[in-house]
Image (tube, rainbow, N blue to C red):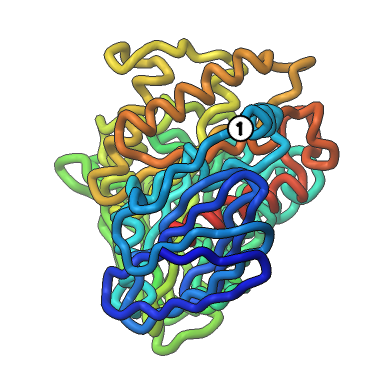
């Protein structure tokens, strides 16, 4: 164990695969690290593990304020002494004056599958996939400084900002992929990567348990074009397949069509993958064939020449936890979560549940908040790990009281602990709407500052883990 004094810097090189660096700081101290992993801890007391690392990975640790205790190569965070919370620390957390990232609610051991996925992505073996589940905050209402969904609002949501922040650190990431139409009946206005080149496509159309609705057409020849801003060479189109579904063509840049027949005797989720000749800026075209209904569920884009953190967005305005539970149909949210096999599912479903409100309930009562969280975490943990984000505080003059909000926040944290998931307490990190001057665009939705703050905090958590 090493004690690093204020202003000191030390670099650790992983001697073998699986090495871990564990840091501990007491109240008032802080440290940061860079290199193969990036993050910080403090000024509230806490303990965090960095890794598992790959042989040769380097982590440079700086003690910014006070002392930092370091255990090198130890796979057990418990090898460091526990940190105690003073009354001042507790009051700081309760008031939202300090960050709780990495403290109490952060449990790196709960997202070991994500850590392995990140390791494989760093080694250029495979992509690491994050699935985001959320409501209007995820969809981006307020993220550009305006309430609602104006021109290209999606481009400023926290999913897109998260990818940008990772890329700025030299970590290949993209947030081009979406499932469901985010509840946007004018989807091309909301997301200007998309255009209807031949009329006949409708958006946010009801498809049982698909959050945000589908991309639907019954018009022969109707054409939908997707031109992601990131370069890519591989596109995957997901669609509903059943006895009531028809056919459509797909091509890249107007090239040869691939005909997809979505008709099937039993309900299923289908997909078709197209590959361009080289990585670049391309347009994916989806063209309806015939007049039998076609319902597109989602779109994925990737670059086959490198391994990235893939961020997939699934959410819509007004979403509640219950909207992501069903597995009755293969295109329902619960089924899709399992089909997409994410390495980490980040669940941000709270403000509509505490403001409506949804009955808090328990794990045995279907339709209640706790039961829904349990089901979503179960679906996420089939392939990967789960992280629950508590919600941005709502204005008490217009919405639920702080006491009511805290009840739902604490239920999320307790559920995460009970099911071996991680929780990141955004709510306590802000404290209250009334105290967060400049964070919001209205009484419910974070503006550009609050959106950036959320993306920053999530970035730190997924890199610390």
Residue nearest the observer in this picture, 86 or 216: 86
Q: Residue 355, how many percent across, how many down?
A: 62, 18
Q: Judge by depth and name the residue closer to the eye, 370 or 45.
A: 45
Mark 1 lies on a secondary structure that is loop
In the displayed structure image, the side of residue 197 where residue 331 appears, left or right: left
Question: From the viewer's perspective, is 87 left or right of 231?
Answer: right
Residue 202 in view: no
Viewport quadrant of the N terminus: bottom left
The percent coordinates of residue 390 (x first, y second) are: 54, 33
The residue under label 1 is 86
Q: Is residue 204 above or below residue 158?
A: above
In which quadrant will I find the C terminus? bottom left
Q: Position of residue 20 (x, y in %)?
A: 35, 65
Residue farthest to the left, as pictured: 265
Q: Is residue 316 left or right of residue 372?
A: right
Q: Position of residue 119 (x, y in %)?
A: 34, 70
Q: Is residue 392 left or right of residue 232?
A: right
Between 144 and 222, the residue placed more toward the observer is 144
Name the residue located 40 percent from the left edge and 37 percent from the top edge: 210
In-front residue for pair 377/261: 377
Question: What crowding class fits label 1: few (fewer than 14 Cα within 10 Å), some (14-19), or many (20 or more)?
Answer: few
Residue drawn at (55%, 57%) of the image: 460
Based on the displayed image, in which of its 4 quarters is residue 138 positioned? top right
Answer with the quarter of the image where residue 198 lies: bottom right
């Amino acid at each position: 164990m090493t004690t690093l004094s204020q202003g000191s810097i030390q670099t650790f090189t992983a001697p073998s695969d699986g090495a871990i660096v564990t840091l501990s700081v007491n109240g008032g101290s802080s440290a940061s690290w860079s290199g193969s992993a990036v993050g910080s801890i403090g000024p509230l007391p806490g303990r965090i593990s960095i890794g598992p690392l790959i042989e040769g990975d380097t982590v440079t640790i700086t003690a910014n304020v006070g002392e930092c205790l370091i255990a090198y190569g130890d796979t057990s965070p418990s090898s460091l002494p526990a940190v105690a919370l003073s009354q001042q620390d507790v009051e700081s957390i309760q008031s939202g004056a300090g960050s709780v990232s990495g403290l109490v609610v952060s449990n790196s051991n709960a997202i070991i599958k994500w850590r392995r996925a990140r390791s494989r992505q760093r080694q250029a073996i495979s992509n690491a996939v994050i699935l985001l589940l959320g409501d209007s905050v995820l969809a981006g209402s307020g993220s550009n400084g305006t309430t609602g969904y104006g021109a290209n609002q999606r481009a400023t949501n926290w999913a897109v900002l998260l990818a940008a922040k990772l890329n700025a650190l030299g970590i290949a990431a993209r947030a081009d992929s979406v499932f469901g139409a985010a509840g946007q009946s004018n989807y091309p206005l909301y997301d200007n990567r998309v255009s209807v080149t031949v009329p006949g496509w409708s958006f946010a159309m009801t498809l049982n348990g698909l959050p945000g609705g589908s991309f639907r057409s019954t018009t022969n020849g109707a054409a939908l074009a997707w031109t992601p801003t990131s370069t890519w060479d591989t596109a995957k189109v997901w669609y509903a397949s059943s006895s009531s579904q028809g056919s459509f063509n797909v091509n890249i840049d107007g090239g040869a069509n691939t005909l997809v027949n979505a008709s099937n005797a039993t309900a299923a989720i289908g997909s078709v993958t197209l590959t361009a000749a080289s990585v670049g800026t391309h347009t994916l075209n989806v063209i309806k064939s015939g007049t039998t209904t076609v319902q597109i569920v989602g779109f994925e884009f990737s670059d086959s020449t490198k391994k990235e953190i893939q961020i997939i967005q699934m959410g819509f305005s007004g979403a509640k936890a219950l909207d992501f539970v069903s597995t009755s149909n293969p295109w329902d949210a619960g089924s899709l979560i399992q089909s997409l096999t994410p390495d980490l599912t980040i669940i941000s479903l709270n403000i509509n549940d505490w403001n409506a409100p949804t009955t808090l309930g328990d794990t045995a009562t279907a339709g209640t908040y706790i039961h829904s969280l349990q089901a979503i975490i179960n679906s996420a943990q089939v392939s990967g790990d789960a992280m629950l984000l508590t919600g941005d505080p709502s204005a008490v003059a217009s919405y639920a009281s702080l006491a009511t909000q805290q009840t739902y926040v604490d239920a999320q944290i307790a559920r995460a602990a009970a099911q071996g998931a991680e929780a990141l307490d955004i709510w306590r990190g802000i404290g209250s709407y009334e105290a967060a001057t400049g964070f919001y665009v209205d009484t419910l939705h974070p503006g550009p500052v609050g959106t950036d703050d959320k993306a920053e905090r999530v970035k730190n958590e997924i890199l610390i883990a």
